[in-house]
Image: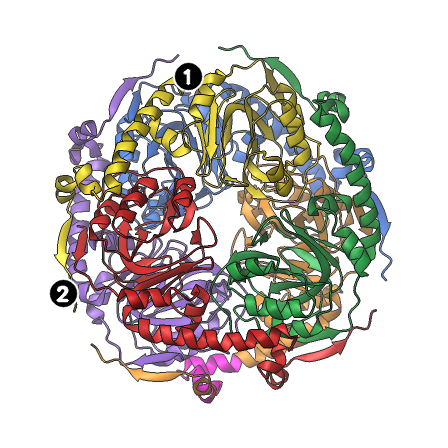
Chain colours: A red, B green, C yellow, D purple, E orange, F blue
Amino acid sequence: MAVVVTETKRTELALVDALGEFGVATIHEAQGRTGLLASRLRPIYRPVRVAGNALTCEVAPGDNWSIHVAVEQAKPGDLLVVTPTSPCDDGYFGELLATSLRAHGVRGLIIDAGVRDVAELTAMNFPVWSKTISARGTVKETPANVQTPIVCAGAYVRPGDVIVADDDGVVVVRREDAQRVLDASRAREDNEATKRELLSSGALGLDIYAMRDKLVQRGLTYVTDSHE
Amino acid sequence: MAVVVTETKRTELALVDALGEFGVATIHEAQGRTGLLASRLRPIYRPVRVAGNALTCEVAPGDNWSIHVAVEQAKPGDLLVVTPTSPCDDGYFGELLATSLRAHGVRGLIIDAGVRDVAELTAMNFPVWSKTISARGTVKETPANVQTPIVCAGAYVRPGDVIVADDDGVVVVRREDAQRVLDASRAREDNEATKRELLSSGALGLDIYAMRDKLVQRGLTYVTDSHE
Amino acid sequence: MAVVVTETKRTELALVDALGEFGVATIHEAQGRTGLLASRLRPIYRPVRVAGNALTCEVAPGDNWSIHVAVEQAKPGDLLVVTPTSPCDDGYFGELLATSLRAHGVRGLIIDAGVRDVAELTAMNFPVWSKTISARGTVKETPANVQTPIVCAGAYVRPGDVIVADDDGVVVVRREDAQRVLDASRAREDNEATKRELLSSGALGLDIYAMRDKLVQRGLTYVTDSHE
Amino acid sequence: MAVVVTETKRTELALVDALGEFGVATIHEAQGRTGLLASRLRPIYRPVRVAGNALTCEVAPGDNWSIHVAVEQAKPGDLLVVTPTSPCDDGYFGELLATSLRAHGVRGLIIDAGVRDVAELTAMNFPVWSKTISARGTVKETPANVQTPIVCAGAYVRPGDVIVADDDGVVVVRREDAQRVLDASRAREDNEATKRELLSSGALGLDIYAMRDKLVQRGLTYVTDSHE
Amino acid sequence: MAVVVTETKRTELALVDALGEFGVATIHEAQGRTGLLASRLRPIYRPVRVAGNALTCEVAPGDNWSIHVAVEQAKPGDLLVVTPTSPCDDGYFGELLATSLRAHGVRGLIIDAGVRDVAELTAMNFPVWSKTISARGTVKETPANVQTPIVCAGAYVRPGDVIVADDDGVVVVRREDAQRVLDASRAREDNEATKRELLSSGALGLDIYAMRDKLVQRGLTYVTDSHE
Amino acid sequence: MAVVVTETKRTELALVDALGEFGVATIHEAQGRTGLLASRLRPIYRPVRVAGNALTCEVAPGDNWSIHVAVEQAKPGDLLVVTPTSPCDDGYFGELLATSLRAHGVRGLIIDAGVRDVAELTAMNFPVWSKTISARGTVKETPANVQTPIVCAGAYVRPGDVIVADDDGVVVVRREDAQRVLDASRAREDNEATKRELLSSGALGLDIYAMRDKLVQRGLTYVTDSHE
């Protein structure tokens, strides 16, 4: 009962790459604090940053068969996004699959499960965000869906949505929002440059952001330590 | 109903810095196995060690407003200690706040919650111990207490207590105990130097610490493997 | 009521070292997907790999006394494997014990609990896989068993079984299976070299492993995205 | 930037109630092993079963304001489904909100966070599935989306999808699949009645399901214990 | 180095009992959302409610010796509050200790660790809030502090502070705040009675609390589902 | 490569039933504080107690096929003990399998994974200790070992070892130790009856167990509260 959807839409790579110049935190803010995958997904090495088109893939617990199916659907610029149909920490992915994905232009892996061969993946410079690291391999008995919409680490991800991942985590940008989020990210970063300069010179956020009145309204009071 | 306490006492920086020459494990032992913050607080990069006066700060869940309030209370040599009023893994703190804190002489951050911009914080060499890493930002709607006594990661911390943090974790030393703990740490480290030499030459702890009799009294017996 | 078993069997070091040339994932597969310790055990630094004879040791919660007892039983080529009799995250082990173990030829530590002095252990290049890092030390009040069969992180480990550990985790190979698993590991690695070459040239696992028919039998179907 | 969507579609209540006659496990199987919310959601009392139209609601961390907004959108037969925008264990919901929801015909609550007043909710017979129980209340500072598609406990839920919940957990059935899943659930339950009778008379699943050949093909062998 | 503090202050029992008429959630709100112990502490049976003077006790990991020491310090109306010096899930407490405590007028137990004999404790109607249930017993080798201020499940508790516990969790009220919190709890409960009546008749919180304007100011907008 | 071992030894049922008259905590103490399964295994209803011969069974992640194989190996008085080969929370077991097991005289289930149909299992009075409750079913693709020694929830269990389980958890008694542990359990319970009487009359454990001298030797001191 598993399905592979072919010829799915993707986001234009120029747009993907432009988004990839911003950090995950910036993009998350720029699109209204949405789209983050759960913070249990961590990179296997740091520092790292990558952006790509989501190539989505479900896997049965302890079974990585559909990742092999997904490779055939890959296009250059994709980022493989894998979610197990029930929680599983096995090592679904290692150096051989990374070699295969790289040969098809895939830029990295996001997986809400375990990976292995992390020394080799690090040496290959193949970026991976995973829930855990485990040497425990998987079988190939039960196929699962490829290139369907999935929930990965608590986020809804469709094939061809943009994924950006860095040291801080992973965020998904909906295909149709990519241009708007790119613009908002640029605006946000410009604004931060000004703030950074002020703050590094010792100015207080309380003043820069004009917070003092609102703090008093919300009940903040100052008292002097009586040193009792 | 939030309060900022001003003019709180601090520990003399010479004393703080002298404590900072010892590791967290040594200090913890030297003060009678007390004062450790929970081990879920981990440094964002290693190796690292820092000591400072606790600048304490509560934050509402998903709301980092009071950190901005805390910056104004900072003095050189402080270490910001942040605890959420209910458990939260959001990324309360990033590169802009670190820039601001550094401009006021703050040496680092201890937070029982999440942080973001960890690539930038690492590049800045700004030490942070946190419960997690998360790109998810926070709002500024609810102020909370600054420079009051807090419970952070299971430890009771007062403004101006000494915090020492390294690869092993974070420990708090009460202001009034700082000199005594410093002396005990020195004594402990001197004692360890002797032990280290003996052990590296192959002497057994069983003999160095004269443990054999007590082990027998507590019921230890030796049997030979029968290789059945 | 604690027991130390002396003169336990060990695996020949030539065999241990030969197994140590393979990764944990390979060995795990080669022996039929068995023998892995739980993935909560993680190395304190990476990359790292070590193999040795299991020197087994139980410890009471918050009490590392029996590790001192274990040192006397050590032989060159051993790897200390420690399990608490009830779950505990304290820092049972630090630089002094590592110095002592190294003086007796022990190659590293596997512990389903916490360790401390991780900066020093890293500087010493002493490999450790632990459940956590904690500065919290332990007492010496209650002895526990040394060189008896134990369950460590969910795996059954007997003295003299072979332990291999690397970035991916820790695996135990039963003494009597060591030669067979070594042969199977070699065969597996030879086979992977061929696969790696094919995959890096763009061949699909679907074809290399002849998976297409079986996938159809198991219900996989392909549909084209309607772009609704 | 929060949105309330009004006049959303719902599933016909006759269909909802018919689905509510089946257990969550049966429905999950009947719709191809999809749609389960994470098993961390547990009922506050047992036994219990309820079905309803999803009334979806996001909440900010530590802030239950949008639940008040959601009440106005309720229709008889709804089941409130609440997800925090970042993980939070606070007690978002208690007896007063349950009183209000009940007055508008809402049948219960699914929440990936904490609740409180569980003694009162139990006495009221108001069914709740939550991630935890916590007396910690919330503020009303930040509105969030109501009646938009959400991800709750790892499942994608749209307003008007059918939710069924019982002692085993919570499942979502897509509005457009409700009739098909109802039919499949009926078929499954009829089939199980026959099996139950056979099994209770001592027949083996190995024979009833004709598993023996397939087990041999997959490598199962029988050996006699040598009682060594 | 363990200390027992004798003749510690207690809160007048009339005040303790008056506070015990309110739920934990009410008291928590009434004292400004402070004083809750972490929600990992759960009652071993429900429904249940108790209030008492904190009789504080630390325990070493896997060692319940100081609970025996604490019994001698008990006075009628006390509630024993136990915290391990490092996290531990062992079963520190069972039916014999409950029998002893009850003989001295102690009303129940709060423990951030495990308990056992829960069937017997339930049959005795002896209320216990614990982190877990475990049959694993403890030793008596290391004494720890009794009747000193402690941190238990993240809250700072001093001997003679008031503890109230029910199905929702556990809260501590500082001795000097007890009367003020009692008054505030009464006021809160009176206010809730009015609200309950309005809400049960179908009035909306949006109107009762006059939230509509503030929601618009904070950016809430209403849109109609386009049923695309 | 899965194996079923037939004709394994069992412990005499008279001995099993005699052990079943004692609680898990008592047996655990009586056999020297060993043999407990991890406390994450909890009964689906309480109160409950059962004893039986271990019928051991491994399962692949998300795959309950070997439970069907195990049923054929069952004998009256057995207790099924199931462990997944990698951690998994799926609902491996429900009412149909319980019906089948009961028809063959099996007394209950211990499983380090999830179960479902808990309302039905409770109504049937079929005792189950599990790691979690989950409606998520499993497939039947990969057989695993039946009646081999296993590690379940951290304990080593062999076919025919005695399992006792109650509200406090689960303990395994080795077949060859069963008579000795039975005798020790009886002795322990007799001793406790005397203690219970003394304690309920107000005698202190400090005196009954003659602890005072040892406490002083270990450094316990008494101080009077200065009420500063």
Instruction: Report the Cα–Cα distance between label 2 and label 1.
Output: 58 Å
Q: Which mark is residue A89?
A: none
Q: Residue at x 71, y 27 (%)?
A: B199
Looking at the rendered structure, the secondary structure element under dot 2 is loop
Q: Quadrant of residue C218?
A: top left
From this view, report whether residue D79 is shown above or below residue F39: below
**Does residue E199 show up magenta in the picture?**
yes
Predominant secondary structure in magenta?
helix
- The residue sitting at 55% across, 41% down in the picture is C44
x and y percent of residue E46 in the render? Answer: 51, 56
x, y percent for residue E33:
60, 70
Give whichever of C121, E56 is nearer the camera: C121
Residue F116: % across, % down: 33, 47
**Residue B188 seen:** yes
Q: Which residue is at 35% across, 41% downward?
A: A94
Checking the image for residue C176, the label placed there is 1
- Location of mark 2 (residue): C226
* Residue at x 40%, y 48% (from the top left corner): A125
Q: Are marks 2 and 1 on the same chain?
A: yes
- For the magenta stretch, what is the residue range? E193-213
Residue type at mark 1: give it: Glu
Confirm or deny contact between disc 2 and disc 1 (CB under 8 A): no
Q: Is residue C207 left or right of residue B28?
A: left
Q: Residues within 10 Å of mark 1 (few under 14, many from 20)?
A: few
Give the camera-side residue of C55 and E162. C55
Chain for numbered disc 2:
C
Assign the C terminus of chain C to one quadrant of the image.
Answer: bottom left
Residue placed furthest toward the bottom: E213
